[in-house]
Amino acid sequence: MEKTAQSAKLASYKLASLSEETKNKALLSIAEHIKNNVDTILKENKKDLAAAEILLKDGSLSKPLYDRLKLDEEKINVIIKGIEDVVKLEDPVNKTLWGMELDKDLELYRVSCPIGVIGVIFESRPDVVPQIVSLAIKSANSVILKGGVEALNSNQIFVKLINEALKTIPEFPENSINLIKTREDVKELLKMDKYIDLLIPRGSNNLVKYIQENTKIPVLGHTEGICHIYIDKEAALNKAIKVSIDSKIQYPAACNAVETLLVHKDIADKLLPLLISEFKKEDVFVKGEELTRRIVPDIEPATEKDWETEYSDKIISIKLVEDINEAINHINLYGSGHTDCIITENTQNRDLFMNLVDSAGVYCNTSTRFADGFRYGLGAEVGISTNKTHARGPVGLEGLTIYKYKLYGNGQIVAEYSGKDAKKYTHKFLNNDN
């Protein structure tokens, strides 16, 4: 493991010097290799699905994880399109973010640069591999990937094809894209703070907490996706129903699917029968607290535990609230800081909600399922962060860069700027093109 991490670190130094043209050639080569090997990818994925079916039957694997595991031609076409979209994105590296003149012929620039070596630990979804790799290459980072054992064959074939594609680009350094396979590897990976600059876990609450508690390496990610929709008393009912249904059923296993609906008590009598009826048509299991069940009795009771549960399934809990302030307080207390939405036609309530809800994504009148790097135009994402440092929300290219300061002088020394008769700093901002 140390050899892998050390090799990835050495590769990261070479990656930082690659031109945008070279990186884009590498990405297009990867897309072509995937396109030419769809049958092989699906064959390997079927091996994983066959083994996963046994785990599903004995309860060792959940249905949402099984669903995420499955690949088909449509998903692979989306993967290829995602890689091609990353090619079109602006190079995030070596961009001058700002410049400042400290004095004549003494100029300071803040310039974007790669983070270095990124370890990504994820569960089930094999399409994560090409997504992460494409963003890592464009941002000039090397990666060490660890997928779930249930997707081992799929992950291996993707990494094999990716590395075959990279060998066609002479300038591209070896050991830029690495795959580790066992839990023991992960334990060793977490000790590699000398070589690994950032860890991104994607998966269950337990996985993320384990990573956070067992490493000195900075961790970027989210533990849960407990997303809310608050339906205000001045909401348009048809809009509220349409958005709520999509947020729950478009992909229930996703971390940005809504788990709890908060409904203003003044519109509950009109809205709830219609909304719950629509949920039941989609086979959604509905829970509600006492006030909700007085209006629609034939649903299951919701308990305190439901407000802090990420179902990742066709289950939703509903709670009536007195006003927008109660809704905001509930979200900030029970939410995971992921994505939360208000449905309203009242601009004052909209702005209050958007400003006071403390989440990475705060929406108005639209589905929580939009919380996604591809949909944000980031090309793809390595994950969604609820952190408040460095990167937040869907983490794309920009989130995989940091910056350094470059100072250009002409023989100046600090002694000249201190003491009696000291020279004065000018501290004038410079245009980026300087």
Image: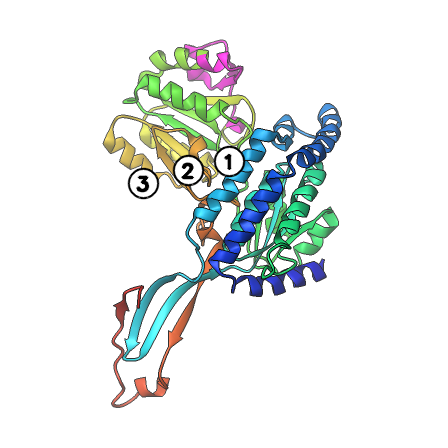
Q: Amino acid at mark 1?
A: Gly
Mark 3 and mark 2: span between their CA atoms? Answer: 12 Å
285 inside magenta stretch:
yes
Measured from the top left, where is residue 95 in percent x and y? Answer: 40, 61
The answer to whether one can see residue 117 in this image is yes
The residue identified by callout 1 is 225
Residue at point 44% right, 52% down? 398
Choose the circle earlier in sequence order: 3 or 2.
Answer: 2
The amino acid on which the numbered mark 2 sits, given as a three-letter code, is: Asn
| Among the two numbered marks 2 and 1 on one chain, the one whose residue lies closer to the N terminus | 1
Residue found at the very far bottom of the displayed protein: 420
Earlier-in-chain disc, 1 versus 3 = 1
* Residue bounds of the magenta highlight: 278-306
Q: Which residue lies at the image location 55% right of the left edge and 43% below the top edge? A: 131
Instruction: Identify the residue shown where x is 71% and y is 33%.
Output: 43
Per the image, the residue denoted by label 2 is: 332
Label 2 Cα crowd, 10 Å radius (few <14 / some 14-19 / many 20+): some
